[in-house]
Amino acid sequence: MSKYTKLAEIIVENVGGRDNIISLKHCITRLRFQLKDESLANDEVLKNTDGVVTVMKAGGQYQVVIGNQVSDVYDEVNKVAHLNPEEDAQLDANDKKDKNWFKNLIDIISGIFQPILIALSAAGVIKGFNTLFVSLNWYSQSTGTYAILNAIGDAMFMFLPIILGFSAAKKFKLNPYMGLIIGAALCYPAVQLDALSKAGKPLFTLFAGTPFHSQVYQTFLGLPIISMNYTSTVVPVILICYLASKVEHGFNKIIPETVRFFFVPLFTLLISLTLGFLLIGPVATWGSNLIGSGILAVRNVSPALAGALVAGLWQILVIFGLHWGIIPIYFNNIVTNGFDNVMMPYYCTTFVTTSVVVAMLIKARKNKKLRKVGIPAAISGALGVTEPAIYGVLLPKKKPLLISCVVSAIVGGFYGFFNLRKFAMGGMGFFELPGMIDPKTHSLDNMYIALIGIGLSIVLGFAATMIFWKDDTAVNEKDGKVKSLQKLVRGEKIELPLKGKIVPLSKVKDEVFSKGYIGKGLAIVPEEGIVTSPVDGEITTLFPTGHAIGITSKNGAEILIHIGMDTVNLEGKYFKPLVKKGDKVKTGQKLLEFNLDKIKEAGYSTITPVVITNSNDFTDVLTPGLNGDNLDDTLLVAVK
């Protein structure tokens, strides 16, 4: 089931049902229905439906405006209504695949964690304050107050696979409730290693004498179940959801529609979770354990190098959930040796991360989007919970994450060299300091080392961010003009694609453009029938009729040039594309020719909107060309 299936069902129902549809086409932004009786359509329901921008009626067409996802919704409407679409009308404005695997990986991770940031921040702050109040002796850990606050703050981290199951499913286009079930199954008490090890003796042991040593307590149809503790983990649920999305997609293709509702989720859960428990979960956990073993081996060679590796890679490990390979070493060392000095170099990352976020907030005082996420992330980080800062601030911006990792490696090396130790479990951030006092000698020397490292973390993290990171909103707030095109960080200068008179989008007699439903920009009343590329980039959309063309610039601006109003009805007459979808183009390169006079004679307006359809990805879209500012032929400036 596509994520647009429900939307398609609502649309079909509220245009009067399948029997009321004569034909369906789509252009760059909207579904264009020809209906037998437009009075049967329910305008208000459609206008208030999530995923529908608005509804319009023009030229004998009932138009449902969708936006950038129109081609996906179009495909789903055809399936739901059992229509037979014309192949040459197909358009996919979003099929451009980035071949940079690392960028794609970052996009997947960010896409999974971004939706849960608000809840993650709230839980982190509550958990941190609960630790603070216990440290201040306002109440003890044995009280009901502590238990309730700890449940509120710790629940999200304890049952993180359930939360991530829902978020990952949405990212992988799997039914999100399937993701919830997958996460819940991983957290189910009866399959956790701790519960099984207390319930009885193992049946046998696998891989004895290797890093993959595993005691087997149960079997599944004769196959050994390698039990793990999956609560608070990250990687297993994401990998299983990815597999489930492929399984679900495959069965949707082969199972008849009449029984698909029941059998697709049945087979998806059985296959993905069986493989998850038997193979994916154990392999992901072993990966974490191998990282921990590797760090132990390095520490035996050089404590400073081991400290630098632990601290420098800690945030990367957290992102992938692989830090759990080190945490068992921490617990084991304190229990068996009375202290831990292997994992403790990571301690500096809390303060480095927080100082980097604070520096970013200072440099980006006007960036409302950053402040919305950054302020609670900084509070949470100061209290020892850095996940909101890592996922919500550092990872999306990339360079601050690198700064944080480098500074953490430096301070982590310092901690490793001076053998920072922790003697008692518990506490986070500043409240871990009491646990660094040697209970046997009562010496404060070890805590002084920790305090020096905290000072280094804050100073170096803050200074490095202030020096090496620049806010992407380099716009002069005083008069709203561009401060300096050459100095804009990731700014996008967009040239005139047509010769003619520049007018505001509000002059376009089409609400989709005039009200900015699909993006900010302006319009041109052309003087000649030639369209040139406004940027260096790639042709990502070229409608078969030639009346609309989309370009994605090298800096990520998605630019739509729509020649005339309702010119899609000309079905390509008077338009001559000179490029094709996927072509790389340069600024000023001729893209399209059209017969201006013939289009006017046919009764169509030639006013041409030029909009940035992903305007929400930018801090602002400036229009110096419209304002008459002296910026040569610059039409728009998109500022990230």
Image (cartoon, rainbow, N blue to C red):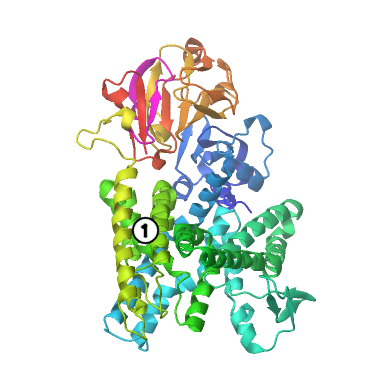
Vertical order, 62 against 419 (above or below): above
Classify the position of the C terminus by image quarter: top left
Q: Provide the secondary structure element on which disc 1 rests.
A: helix
Q: Where residue 198 sits in the image (x, y, percent)?
A: 62, 88
Which residue reaches farthest front?
A: 301
The magenta region covers: 488-507
**Residue 328 in view, yes or no:** yes
**Residue 118 in view, yes or no:** no
Vertical order, 215 against 250 (above or below): below
- Of residue 232 and residue 59, the one placed in the foreground of this image is 232
What residue is pinned by disc 1? 353
- Of residue 42 and residue 109, the one placed in the foreground of this image is 109
Q: How many marks?
A: 1
Queried whether the magenta region covers residue 324, the answer comes back as no
Amino acid identity at mark 1: Thr
Q: Where residue 205 sits in the image (x, y, percent)?
A: 73, 79
